[in-house]
Amino acid sequence: MRNPNLAAVLSLIVPGVGQLYNGRILAGILWLVGLILVIPGFWIGTGGVLGIAYHALSAYTAYSYAKENPLRASKF
């Protein structure tokens, strides 16, 4: 079972980690790359407003995916 709250908290702290927790490897990597390449400019250029929005959007997408897809696919 996926825990939507845990996925949201993980992505709120580090965008992309909640997606990785949900098993969405490519989405997680893209969020992490954005964190490294784009977010510093968002934080500095807008006084943190877009940086906070990026973290919140990442948390929301991780939460909503975990809520809609509660079961992990079995590899056996």
Image (spheres, grey):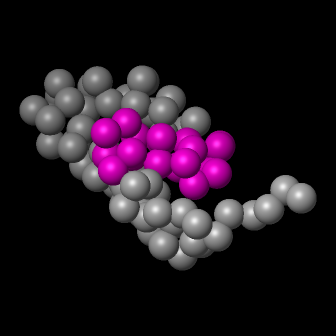
User: As displayed, is residue 61 above or below residue 48?
Assistant: below
Find residue 63 and report its horizontal and vertical position in percent: 42, 63
**Residue 50 sits in which quadrant?**
top left
Query: Residue 61, can we see it?
Result: no
**Residue 28 sits in which quadrant?**
top right
> Which secondary structure is most common in the magenta stretch?
helix
Q: Tell me if 45 is positioned left or right of 56 in this view.
A: left
Find residue 75 and report its horizontal and vertical position in percent: 85, 56
Q: Quadrant of the C terminus?
A: bottom right
Question: Is residue 53 found inside the magenta-colored segment of the image?
Answer: no
Query: In the image shown, does 4 or 44 lie closer to the viewer?
Result: 4
Find residue 58 and report its horizontal and vertical position in percent: 39, 50
Query: In the image shown, does 36 or 8 lie closer to the viewer?
Result: 8
Q: Tell me if 5 is positioned left or right of 40 in this view.
A: right
Q: Residue at x 55, y 48 (%)?
A: 21
Q: Residue at x 47, y 63 (%)?
A: 3
- The magenta stretch is 9-28
Find residue 34 and report its horizontal and vertical position in percent: 45, 33
Work out which residue is located at the far left of the displayed protein and give it: 47
Work out which residue is located at the far right of the displayed protein and give it: 76
Q: Residue at x 68, y 63 (%)?
A: 72
Query: Residue 53, can we see it?
Result: yes
Query: In the image shown, does 12 or 2 lie closer to the viewer?
Result: 2
**Residue 30 sits in which quadrant?**
top right
Q: Quadrant of the N terminus?
A: bottom right
Q: Residue at x 25, y 49 (%)?
A: 53
Query: In the image shown, does 16 or 2 lie closer to the viewer?
Result: 2
Q: Tell me if 36 is positioned left or right of 69 in this view.
A: left
